[in-house]
Amino acid sequence: MNDTLFMKILVLGDSTAGKTSFLKRLSFNTFEEETNNTVGCDFCMKTVTTPENKTVNLQLWEIAGQDKYAGASKLYIRGAVGIIIITDVTKPEGLQTALKWRQIMMEAEETLESREIPIMIIQNKLDLVKGDLGDTQTKEYLEEFVITNHFTAGFQTSAKWNLNIEESIQCLIKSTIKFLKGESLYRSSRLTQSVSSLRLSRMSVENSGRKSLIRRYGANTRNPADACNC
Ligand SMILES: Nc1nc2c(ncn2[C@@H]2O[C@H](COP(=O)(O)OP(=O)(O)O)[C@@H](O)[C@H]2O)c(=O)[nH]1
Ligand SMILES: [Mg+2]
């Protein structure tokens, strides 16, 4: 039987981290080098089918990243069942912004329930990471950061190269389904080998850039996608 679920998801993060690009890639499979600043908030819908054949209607709300809109983001948390925080992997302080955005959500008095909702970190613009990886740019660092700071999952993505966009959403959906069932979301220990290597090997490689990313992160090695605890 094909159940249909409805999920309201907030997409947060500093300006230019790639929130709009992430959503456009997810919803329309497009990417633009030049984007307009999001004013206030933006909204899109996406229907996703899970491997278990559940249909999920996602309602994705992007909250503009400028500080002046941070207060407004608290208004949108009502009814949300998942949060994606998008950070820029090229910025050393990128992951710290995830803590800031989570804190903003936690401070929303009327939304204490949000403490338990799945919060996933995205480190976007992976295509721009060239040469030696900085300390905060490795998948191991992200995984450690996710565990230490009790996020639900972490993914390194490229909206430009369509890398890990669908995978991250599928992970969030799984976490959200667990959340809605009242199951625990957090890991107490490191994950063992997971299925993301299969996901990677199934990906159709569209250009040499993506090929080199897959070579770099390896079809047989763990990817930050493994931070998904589903
Ligand atoms: N190279 C690269 N650029 C990206 C990526 N995602 C977004 N951008 C660029 O970063 C800029 C800001 O993106 P945008 O989606 O508007 O960021 P937002 O402010 O968080 O919504 C734009 O010029 C995008 O083309 C990515 O994965 N790779
Ligand atoms: Mg935007």
Image (spheres, grey):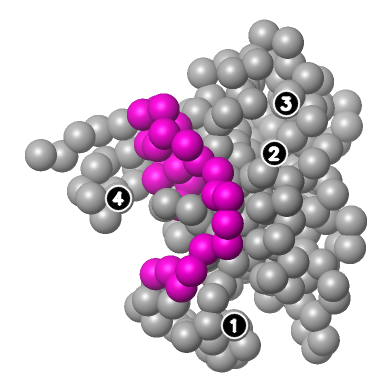
Mark 3: secondary structure? helix
Q: Position of residue 30 (x, y in %)?
A: 52, 60
Q: How far separated are the C-alphas under marks 2 and 4?
A: 24 Å
Residue numbers of the magenta segment: 171-195
Residue in the image at 59% along x and 67% along y: 224
The answer to which of marks 4 and 3 sits earlier in the sequence is 4
Mark 3 or 2: the one toward you: 3
Do the residues bearing badges 3 and 2 touch, measured as CB atoms within 8 Å?
yes
Q: Which mark is residue 217?
A: 1
Quadrant into which the N terminus falls: top left
Q: Residue at x 74, y 66 (%)?
A: 141
Label annotation for residue 47: none
Q: Amino acid at mark 4?
A: Thr
Q: Which residue is mark 3?
A: 105
Specify the amino acid type for callout 1: Tyr
Looking at marks 3 and 2 on the same chain, the residue that comes earlier in the sequence is marked by: 2
Is residue 109 depicted above or below 15 in this figure?
above
Three-letter code for the amino acid on which mark 3 is drawn: Met
Which of the two discs, 1 and 2, sits closer to the camera?
A: 1
Kindly identify which residue carries mark 2: 12
Up/down of 145 relative to 45, above or below = below
Q: Residues within 10 Å of mark 4 (few under 14, many from 20)?
A: some
Measure the C-alpha gap from mark 3 to mark 2. 10 Å
Q: Amino acid at mark 2?
A: Leu
> CA separation, marks 4 and 3?
28 Å
